[in-house]
Image (cartoon, rainbow, N blue to C red):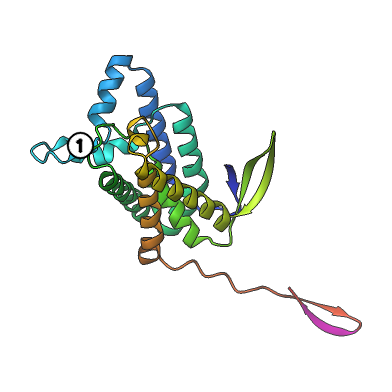
Amino acid sequence: MIPLRDTVPSRRFPIVNTGIIALNVLVFIFEQLTRSEQLDHLIVTWGLVPSQFWAFSDWRPWLTLFTSMFLHGGWWHLISNMLALYIFGDNVEDRLGPFRYTLFYLFSGLMASAAHLIAYSGSSLPTVGASGAIAGVLGAYMVLYPQARVLTLVPIFYFLRVVELPALIYLGFWFISQLFNGLFALTAADVFQSGGVAWWAHIGGFVFGLATIKLISPPPPSLPPPTYRYEYEDDHLRRRW
């Protein structure tokens, strides 16, 4: 399922969310301009490699907790991540404000990386992508906007159909699919090492977003009092919305 847009309008321009998207795109353009052998070195050096992370004598693996969030492995990897961040991130920033949203996004990425490190502590495969941090944004959105709906492109047999789904169903299905695949990957030792998806980073980020967003988000803005208009109908004064 591919999300196209949601039904929750933002009250202000999402400056941080837009900046994060722009930074990811600029870094990816830099990757594309890098020669193949240099790109491989870049990914290994600044991607998150669990087996190297536990070498506490070196400070660089700790920095990769952040740098790996802004690297991507291909066009579809980048586009799918940035599309999800564009659709859901503006509303979470709208509720948190720019400063809190920045911290929340980064900490979501850190918790996603921590989950990945625990699940694959001995892996020598570099992991890159913003999807762990974005998963935290999805978890937060699910809590903050449970009544929202998501316009979604759904493949049905050989056809594509646009369907408006409740956000709870869309995001709930997404999380269950990540959990199912994550559990399966743990039972097949070579799945991730052969170049699989970092399912547990997604799970860790999403759970972090679910668990913490209510603790850090201010209350929703109060709605303005209803306005009425009065008119005469059959010589009686009636109140209308």
Classify residue 49 by image quadrant. top left
Residue 238 painted magenta:
yes
Relative image position of residue 48 (x, y in whole percent): 26, 36
Q: Is residue 11 visible?
A: no
The reply to whether residue 89 is visible in this rendering is yes
Compare residues 79 and 97 and report the one nearer the observer: 79
Quadrant placement of the N terminus: top right
Tell me: 81 left or right of 151: left
- Residue 209 in the image, given as x and y percentages of width and height: 39, 56
Quick one: label 1, few (<14), some, or many (20+) residues within 10 Å?
some
The amino acid at mark 1 is Ser
Residue drawn at x 22%, y 28% as measured from the top left: 45
Disc 1 target residue: 51
17 is within the stretch colored magenta:
no
Drawn side of residue 137 relative to residue 100, left or right: right
Q: Which residues are magenta?
A: 235-239
Vertical relation: 83 (above or below) 215: above
> Residue placed at 38% from the left, 56% from the top?
207
Outermost left residue: 57
Residue 10: percent from left, percent from top = 53, 53
